[in-house]
Image (cartoon, rainbow, N blue to C red):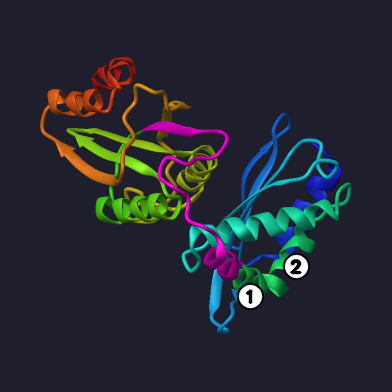
Amino acid sequence: MSELALEELSALAAIYCEPDACEVLAVSEMHGITFRIQISVKELLDTDVLLKLLFHLPVNYPSTLPDISVNSDQLTRAQCMDVKDKLLEQAKKHLSEPMVHDLILWIQQHLKYVIKQSATVCSEKPTLSKGTSTEDGIWMLLLHLDHMRAKAKYIKTVEKWTSDLRLTGRLMFMGRIILILLQGDRSSIKEYLILQKTSKVDVDSSGKKCKEKMSSVLCETKVQSQHKRFQTFEVKEYSTLDELQKEFETAGLTTLFSEFVPPLLK
């Protein structure tokens, strides 16, 4: 891990010192540094947009570009992706030098123009026909959640994320088992995982908002020809294991069920 990255993180923590403005998520000699910066930016109509910018600085940063994820309750997922793309374009201009603060200043000054351009592109872009996907194809993710204290809020959040990212699938409850099965573009699956791990989606035993620390990825794989494509995202409750198994079987996912679900009952 470079000294430049550590020095930059220290400087950012000093600049963005308000509560929740700068949050270090991980520091590793092998994998680098992951942190989130939260800023308020003026949008087209001079309304405040709360931007959550997740940066991952690889071990050889700044010789290598950072990974960036953008999230905001005031923007659509498509707009967040456009902001991310523009930030990565700017990052290329700063390669080999610390760049995070420059990128933050740039988006504070240019967000309204990025959003305006995004709206123009969206209105001109032809709609993809059914069955069209990215070159990566359609992927599938099976997640296990240990618990869900603020159930209604948690469900609403998951429904918003899946809608924004155009993911389909199921949020499944059976007794104490909670599973999330998603299908969609691989990039959207990865974006969902970042949101799941870094957002405060639940509450702890004292009722304080907290991140999801007890979720586990059971399977992440490409959708095969024998797998049925879900057309929507639905929240479903099952009273028996047989009912849950039938849901998997109907989707052509019998092997997935047999490999990952029964061990959760032990």
Residue 130 is one of the magenta-drawn residues: yes
Residue furthest to the left: 239
Q: What element carries label 2?
A: helix
Residue furthest to the right: 96
Is residue 93 placed above or below 243 in the rendered structure? Answer: below
Q: Nearer the viewer, mark 2 or mark 1?
A: 1
Q: Name the residue under label 1.
A: 112
Q: Is residue 189 left or right of residue 83?
A: left
Tell me where the magenta segment starts and ends, as one range: 118-143
Q: Which residue is drawn at 54% across and 69% down?
A: 50
Q: Which residue is drawn at 42% across and 32% down?
A: 141
Q: Nearer the viewer, residue 224 or 44?
A: 224
Q: Which mark is residue 106?
A: 2
Q: Nearer the viewer, residue 118 or 60?
A: 118
The amino acid type found where label 1 is placed reads Lys
Residue furthest to the bottom: 46
Is residue 191 placed above or below 31 in the rendered structure? Answer: below
* Cα–Cα gap, marks 2 and 1: 11 Å
The amino acid type found where label 2 is placed reads Trp
Q: Is mark 1 on a helix, strand or loop?
A: helix
Q: Which residue is drawn at 33% across and 20% down?
A: 256
Q: Position of residue 77 (x, y in %)?
A: 50, 57
Q: Which of 140 and 100 is in front in this view?
A: 140
Q: Position of residue 88 (x, y in %)?
A: 73, 53
Q: Residue at x 29, y 51 (%)?
A: 155
